[in-house]
Amino acid sequence: MAELRLNSPLQYVKGVGPKKAAIMAGLGMTEVRDLLFYLPRRYLDRTSVTPIAKLRVDEPATIVGVVKAHGILHGRRKRYEVIIEDDTGGIPLLFFQGVKYWERTFKKGQIFAATGTVGYFMGLQMVHPDLERLEDEGDRMIHAGRIIPVYPQRAELSKAGLNSKTIRRLTTFIFDNLTERIPDYLPPAECRRQQLPVLDEAIRTIHYPDNRDQVEYGRRRLAFDELIRFQHLVFRNREHKEKTVKTRTYAPPGEMLGGFKNNLPFDLTSGQKKAVKEIFDDLQKEHPMARMLQGDVGCGKTVVAVLSALYIAENKLQTAFMAPTEILAEQHFRNWQEPLSKVGVTAGLLTASLKAAEKKETVRRCLEGEIDILFGTHALIYDYVSFNHLGLVIIDEQHRFGVQQRGKLYAKGDNPDLLVMTATPIPRTLALTLYGDLDISTIDNLPAGRQPIRTVWRATDVRDKVYDFIKDDIAKGGQTYIVYPLIEKSDQIELENVEDAYRDLSEGVFKDCRVAIVHGRVKPKERDEILGRFRDGEIDILLVTTVIEVGIDNPNATIMVIEHAERFGLAQLHQLRGRIGRGEKQATLVAIAHQPISDIAAQRLKFFISCTDGFRIAEADLELRGPGEVFGVRQSGPLEFNSVRLSQDRDLLEASRDLLRRLFQEYNSLDTDYRSLLDYLNKRAAQIDHTLGGG
Ligand code: ADP
Ligand code: MG
């Protein structure tokens, strides 16, 4: 009988030979502890498995069934098709990649669980679902009302025969022979206070739950851990900021700013003025600013950011202004270079697609302090970019960047001031959680004279009428975007694509109009040239994919048509809509939905046409999709929320903030186990080398 400890090599576990051990080591698992923390990613039971006859298009589902037939299909693209059947019906699973591998994987009569989104191509199908081979026993367990954990599938593991079933066997052996419990860094008193299991219990429960409630009980404990680690960093950033004193001071706003404002073609809105004042006040304080500027699409955040950069330039310091796409970075540069130069401020642009010589020259000028405001993309964070005296970092559409990227840019200065911007308004509780280390300025009104965008939802059969409407509008001087979900025809999914549409429309119904096309595969240079011409009114209709989603600005665009609106998320639809109605003319958005439309999609569209308030859209989106997607938490690397479900874990979130407050503010009066919790968190944070952007 083996006596196992948490740090025993995995080879001591029965069933793990040298070969399996080597493969697990390749995935970072060498000790018993590592395997215990390799957690199921979902569970199968009667409530989570959908009978095939009940599948609905566009909805995610897990099915369990028997392989009835499988083989290669030759079409426009070679693919592997597997027919899976349960008592209620059958459905094809399709694999376009790894045909050889799938050929070896499937045998007639085997039972599989497949999880994916149900697609439609001449009938329901699932493309590249997640697969889990179940033994008959697994199938029976489900029918018997049991709950089966499913582990993340990795190609390497499956090849070594490490499927969910074998992993279950290994963890059973481990728990039977483990001579110690998993130590907990959370004080037992805190677990009781939060009604959460201690770590050892949580881990056991998660591997071997008896029912869904137990899964949830264990999950909440791990979620709490993730929240504490995250909040710890937020608190640490705050504390760091409060301790940091800037070596630079800013004079009160001067003439440059005055001159610049006088040259603007508009007056600032009250919301913009308020934001500018908050930012300027903050900049004059002795601690570095860490501020988020939020406001709905089109409210005019850019000019506020540019004024801030100008203020920094007045004080002889530089600004780095980072945007998520080349189109956007170039647009900012093009829009602001001239007005800035009029007051003696030099702007520069750095993106990956510039010629090497241009890049080199820009980098040199920046280093020598000849550039005051450097606009750019991710290119700004490359190692070869340095500043002479960086005073302010501005990050546009900040949720598009990962924590590390923001941190890297930040590190190019000596505790520079920070302004991050987002058009995704964040409900207050969440903002506190995710950005508790940032102060927030909100622009809550749109520039005057904007008319609300008329939004309608139409079926495909009225397309001709929509096209007539576009032609009438062009005759009156308007411009149109038509948005498509795909660049070119796909045989995986039946969707309109921008290339075919361009051919059909520019030679057909719109042959007398000036039509152009832009998508992600158009070369940046050409793309800019086209967008520039569109902006200058030389193009009537621009056919696009979602490359235009972020920030593109043409105040004269009056109509947007979105093909397959049923496929887009709420926030994305709202962002797209933000591209029109930026001037004073009435703008119209036509969301064209193609059958079949899922219930969720119908709900989304109904909400979308009835609401133009970005705040309410963000909240609805949060309910429908969860915050990972909405706020880019996913991208935050070591801070990934795997167990947290922010929409249902608000209590844990408050509790984690409360705990951290105690740790930071009452450290000296805390019990030793609470102190060691903070020490543990500090040590961990030091390893992550993290800057949330707050400094
Ligand atoms: P966002 O907040 O979405 O980044 P932008 O900064 O791109 O919005 O501004 C949207 C449009 O509104 C731009 O064309 C900009 O020039 C214009 N704009 C900004 N502020 C005002 C204002 N105060 N009055 C009129 N138009 C404005
Ligand atoms: Mg913007």
Image (spheres, rainbow, N blue to C red):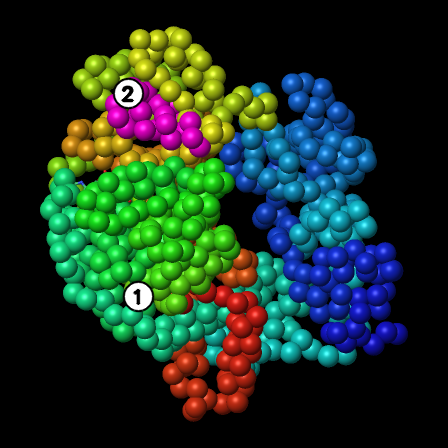
Q: Mark 1 belongs to which amino acid?
A: Met
Does residue 645 sit above or below 153 in this rendering?
below
Residue drawn where x is 32% and y is 73% of the image: 247
Residue 275 spot, x, y in % from top left:
21, 57
Residue 233 in view here = yes
Residue 61 spot, x, y in % from top left:
57, 41
Q: What secondary structure is marked by label 2?
A: loop
**Quadrant in the picture for residue 105:** top right
State the residue position of label 2: 538
Which quadrant does the C terminus fall into?
bottom left
Q: Residues within 10 Å of mark 1 (few under 14, many from 20)?
A: many
| Closer-to-camera residue (662/585) | 585
Left or right for 501, reference 14: left
Residue drawn where x is 38% and y is 50% of the image: 365
CB of residue at label 1: within 8 Å of ligand 1?
no
Q: What secondary structure is marked by label 1?
A: loop
State the residue position of label 1: 289
Left or right for 231, reference 276: right
Residue 95 spot, x, y in % from top left:
68, 32
